[in-house]
Image (tube, rainbow, N blue to C red):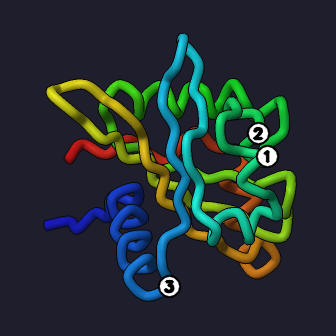
Amino acid sequence: MRNEVNLPTLLDKLITEYEKIHGEMIFKFEKQAGKFILIDINQGLLDVVNLTRDEVVGKGLNALFICEESISKLQKICGIAWEGKKVVYYLIPDTNQDIFLVVALKPNMYQGQVIEVVAHCVSLDSKEFVYIANTLASLEPLGILDD
C-alpha cells in the first residue's frame, strides 16, 4: 500500500498548528460590485508585509502587496475561494521580498452563500527557503481542498 501526502491539506494543517503557537496572520475579503475588496487585515500580517491598515482595507486586491502582473492570478484564486472552495497558494509580497507567504483561503458561508473569505498566512524566510520560493513562484495554486 502506497502512502501519499496531499500537499495542500498538509500545508493547511501546518498553518493551523502554526497559528496556535505564533498567532494568526490573516486578511479578509468580500466581493462588492463584482470586485474583490479587502475588508480586514490584522497587525501581525501588516507588520511582515510593511503596510498600514489604511493602505489595504477598503481597497482591491492590487493593494495586497503584490505586483500588477500577479493580479490576474490572484483574481482567479480568489474566485475559486469565492465559489466556496478552500485554496492553498503562495505569494512573494512586493513590499517585503525577504519572505514568501503560504496562504490558505477559507470561505465563510451563511445560508449556503459565501459572505467573506478569510486568508490564513504563514511567513517563511525566502532566503532560507530560496529553492522552494523560486519553485513556487512558477506554479499555479498549490491546490484546492475538498473537505
Q: Residues within 10 Å of mark 1 (few under 14, many from 20)?
A: few
The residue at the far bottom in this view is 21
Residue identifier under label 3: 22
Q: How crowded is mark 3: few (under 14 residues within 10 Å), some or many (20 or more)?
A: few
Amino acid under disc 1: Glu
Q: Which of marks 1 and 3 is in front?
A: 1
Depth check: 1 or 20 in front? 20
Q: Which of marks 2 and 1 is in front?
A: 1
For marks 1 and 3 on the same chain, the one whose residue lies earlier in the sequence = 3
Which percent across, then down, holds residue 80?
A: 43, 28
Do the numbered discs 1 and 3 sit on residues whose CB atoms are within 8 Å? no
Which percent across, then down, holds residue 79?
A: 48, 25
Depth check: 117 or 84 in front? 117
Mark 3: secondary structure = helix
> At x 76% / y 81%, what residue is drawn?
128
> At x 76% / y 68%, what residue is drawn?
99
In the rendered image, the vertical position of residue 132 relative to residue 29, given as above or below: below
Mark 1: secondary structure = helix
Horizontal side, residue 77 vs residue 129: left or right: left
> At x 30% / y 41%, what residue is drawn?
108
Do the numbered discs 2 and 1 sit on residues whose CB atoms are within 8 Å? yes
Mark 2: secondary structure = helix
Q: Distance between the residues labelled 3 and 2?
A: 25 Å
For marks 2 and 1 on the same chain, the one whose residue lies earlier in the sequence = 1
Amino acid under disc 2: Ala
Residue identifier under label 1: 55
As drawn, the label of residue 63 is 2
Give the tally of numbered discs. Answer: 3
Depth check: 6 or 89 in front? 89
Amino acid under disc 3: His
Q: Distance between the residues labelled 1 and 3?
A: 25 Å
